[in-house]
Image (cartoon, coloured by chain):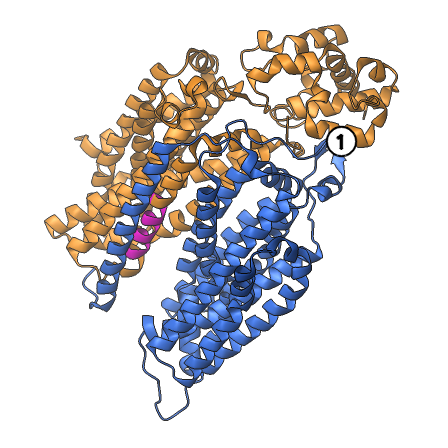
Amino acid sequence: MEYPFWHVPGLGSTMLIPVVALPHVLVSHFAVGGGILLWLGIRHAHRTDDGPFLGYLCRLTRFFVLVTAVFGAITGVGIWWTIALASPEATSTLIHAFVFGWATEWVAFVVELLAAFGLFYLWDRLGPPARERVALTYAVAAWISLVLITGILAFMVSAGRWVESRSFWDGFLNPTFLPGVVARTGGAVAITGLWVFLHVTLTGQAERVRVHVVTWAARWSFVGVALIAVGGAWWYAAAPAYVQAKLLAAPAVLIISSVCIGATMLLTAAIAFGPFWRSEWLVPPLAGLLFLMGATGMVSGEFLREAGRKPYTIERYLYSNGLRPSDVEAVRADGFLNRSRWARVHLGRDVPALFGADGRATPEAAAGLGGAERRQVGEVIYEHQCGTCHTRMGYNALLPRVRHASPETLELMILRMDELSSAMPPWAGRPWEAAAVVEYLTHAAHGGDR
Amino acid sequence: MSPIPTFDALGLPAPLWLLWGLKVFGFWIHLFFMNLWFAGLLVGLVLARRPGPLGTSGRKLVGSMPIFIAFGVNAGIVPLLFLQVVYPQFFYTTTILQAWAWLAIVPLVLIAYYGVYVDVLARKAERSTRWTSGAGWPAALVFIGVGIVLSTEMQLLTRPEQWVDVAGATTAGAVAGTGLALDRAAFLRYAMTFGLALGTVGAYLAFERHVLRRAPADNPTERDPLPRLVVALIAAGLAVFAGAALPYLAVAGPYLEGWAWLRIVAGAGPAVALVGGVLYLRRPARATASLVLGLQLLSLLGNAVARQVVQIGEIGRVFDAASVPVALQVSPIVLFLVTLALGLVVVTWLLVTFAHAATAKPARA
């Protein structure tokens, strides 16, 4: 309500978030899982004096640093910039509620980065004890990052007592925080293990190294996937009721996620422990398929989390369209256009006749406008209240859905949208503003340009 | 109605002095590393083509670039974080108005960063081809180019009177995000930073040669060209800085009234660094190389503080941050400070470990 709205044609500004976030989620989990597996692997190789395995880990480390320190770090900033553009109110809340959480995470990331560079540049020169300690430092710092970020992400789904207390700890230690940490730690280890399958089959390792690495990675992947299953079930049980209901109402994504995780668990168990498994069966296409399945499981899990929390961006505190539940009654009484700062900035310039001498938009002034101007008013309200999630004709498009609705039905749907769908926020505005939106939508749905 | 949104309902989580202090501290660190890639990548690539000690210094500079970029980007998060805490309504609004240019920084920096890696790793493996060794050049241009978007953003957020015009062409009351408020003040800020960056690169080259690498002169009978280059870079930086700072004073000067010491430190800092450079030229050694870098860091600190004072003054025309209620987050602040202290211990330990390892002989993989 306070900020300008950024219009991204066809996609919507909020859909830019997953475009940046999904690759980052994979890579950032990679960074954490890579840290843990590299430390475990280095330790094992030193204990068993396994030079070829250590050589392989050296190669893997270089890959990890190139992916995580560059792509992970830059896309991490990219997510932050994208959410601030698409949802400034939510970003501002996350910053003001948790600024010292973010700052603490920054310290962990500096340590992680430095340790990673040490392994990358000085692998050959670090003695075994120092190499192990540096790898452990990397693993711990990366995992602390995961814990801190998980607390803040989980807060958006289940804000817990924070909504009343505004206490940092009530927000951070929210109901889905711990299950989130378990699931994400598992996801990090699993996705790294699955990547190792692909990496080892593509890099032409000697047979002995390949067999050893595959079995080793499979065991840890299995542990990771098991943690995802445990953490996921716990997360579901801890999630607010409205989130649980929403997940059950999205069976397709839930099924995809469950099938991917279940199949990955079975296959990794077969590779790690199965008596009939032969390591030469793990050829690049199969390894690629396994990685794809694991990645799909993770990505669909993120989609479930995002979809589950609608209509909120932050549970009970902020709706997806930037309105606060606590403001809705006041906006209904006063009118959306008398409250929405940038909608007024635009209409004050384009349709000045809407505003009286006291600067307020009134139904009488709206009634005196021409049809095109009234539709423009409706379009502005539509963009600011609905445009966050709905494009006109692109992703999650609204115009095709309203094409067959009569104006009366459409108006009723708008005024009571939160009662018709649990994913929709309540209408915030006066009835004449809803009528302007209906006029615009009806006209646009039948091919009118305004 | 004013286009400036109201402040976040949660208020400030800490006193302003702490938030501004952390912001300036982060910006100072960022400024140092950012300077090294901003002007340093270009300087390093030019030098790396030359034979002799200048070529060696250039190759070392380019070779360290991935680390500078990583820590520079990382340190850049700090001032942006605290900027969002103190001035969210200014920062978010102006990034939305210039959304596409602002967002483009992310893929551009990503591509440039990988370009640097391609160049550096190919040099390290001595497998440079025309393509791999060429990858650093477009990366250098990208880093120089994205700086103007950042300068523009930092300038626009202090100019709410321009916002409605920058919003420009709109789509039904929404912002297209295609604006870019390139104006004289933004270019002057950009040029001042580039001037500082040239000085930082010069000071770093001296420090790298005499303190980090401890390299003796290649041929003691020949005159070492590096000190002359160092002084030339610092002098060129001073010229660019002064050329931009003098007209910029018309914009920023009123906000620095009553900050005489800061005007001196920020304005004269690059000149004092040049004095250090001349001392280094007369006697190239570890002490003088450290001195010139120390003076340059002081100059950067002065400029970081001056930037903050000017920003407070410019935004203070329309918004008084001191009027925002503070909802003090004591235990999270303690958590951060304790983690920071522990982090510094771990970072020190890691650096010592790496320093020992760097002098050790390579072991088996």
The amino acid pointed to by label 1 is His
Q: Give the residue at x 25% y 52%.
A: A56
Q: Colour of chain A?
A: orange
- Extent of the magenta region: A108-118
* Residue B274 point in image, percent of width and height: 50, 75
* Residue B80 point in image, percent of width and height: 51, 45
Q: Is residue B353 or residue B11 the one in the foreground? A: B11
The quarter in which the N terminus of chain A is drawn is: top right
Q: Is residue A188 above or below residue B354?
A: above
Query: Is residue A115 on the magenta stretch?
Result: yes
Which chain can be seen in blue?
A: B
Q: Is residue A133 left or right of residue A449?
A: left
The reply to whether residue B247 is in sight is: yes
Q: Mark 1 sits on what residue?
A: A346
Q: Is residue B19 left or right of residue A350?
A: left
Q: Residues within 10 Å of mark 1 (few under 14, many from 20)?
A: many
Q: Residue furthest front?
A: B258
Query: Is residue B341 on the magenta stretch?
Result: no
Q: Give the residue at x 78% y 22%.
A: A377
Q: What main secondary structure does the magenta stretch of the protein show?
A: helix
